[in-house]
Image: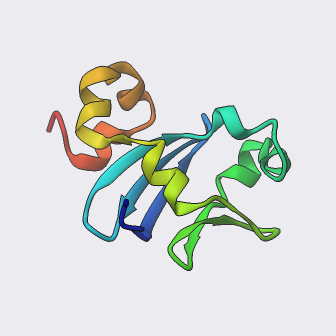
C-alpha cells in the first residue's frame, strides 16, 4: 500500500506540466498534457487558466473547483533527479534546473 503524500508546493508551467513538492520533501515532475482533453481539465486548456494552480487540502487545485488526485500526481510523476537525467532538455525548458540551482 502506498502512503498518501500531500502536495505542499506546485509550480504550473505553460507547457501543461507541474513541478511538485510533496510533504516528504520529494520533488517530482508531472506531465498534465495527456489529461487536458478530458473533463474537468479541458476547462484549463488556456495556459492562463492552467497557470492558476495552487495547493489546497494536500493536492493541486485550480479555480472552478478543479483538482487532481494526489495519488495520481505521485504515482504518475517522475522524481526530479530521474527527470533531470532522462529529459535534460525538457527539464531546462520548464525551468526545473533553475528551480534547483543546477548549473550555477
Residue 12 in the image, given as x and y percentages of width and height = 55, 51
Pick out the residue farthest to the front: 1
Residue 89 in the image, given as x and y percentages of width and height = 36, 20
Pick out the residue farthest to the left: 104
Q: Quadrant of residue 24?
A: bottom left
Residue at 30% x, 21% y is 86
Q: Quadrant of residue 92?
A: top left
In this rendering, the answer to whether 39 lies above or below 53 is: above
Q: Quadrant of residue 32?
A: top right
Q: Along the line of sight, which residue is nearer the eye, 78 or 55?
A: 78
Is 85 on the left-hand or right-hand side of 1?
left
Residue at 72% x, 43% y is 47
Q: How many marks?
A: 0
Q: How is the image coloured?
A: rainbow
Quadrant occupied by the N terminus: bottom left
Residue at 39% x, 39% y is 95
Residue 29 in the image, given as x and y percentages of width and height = 42, 42
Is 9 on the left-hand or right-hand side of 61?
left
Quadrant occupied by the C terminus: top left
In this rendering, the answer to whether 69 lies above or below 79 is: below
Amino acid at each position: 500500500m502506498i502512503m498518501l503524500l500531500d502536495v505542499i508546493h506546485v509550480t504550473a508551467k505553460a507547457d501543461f506540466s507541474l513541478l511538485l513538492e510533496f510533504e516528504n520533501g520529494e520533488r517530482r515532475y508531472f506531465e498534465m498534457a495527456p489529461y487536458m482533453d478530458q473533463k474537468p481539465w479541458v476547462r484549463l486548456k488556456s495556459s492562463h487558466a492552467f497557470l492558476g494552480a495552487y495547493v489546497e487540502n494536500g493536492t493541486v487545485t485550480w479555480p472552478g473547483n478543479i483538482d487532481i488526485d494526489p495519488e495520481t500526481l505521485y504515482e504518475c510523476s517522475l522524481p526530479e533527479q530521474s527527470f533531470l537525467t532522462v529529459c535534460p532538455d525538457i527539464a531546462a525548458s520548464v525551468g526545473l534546473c533553475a528551480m534547483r540551482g543546477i548549473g550555477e
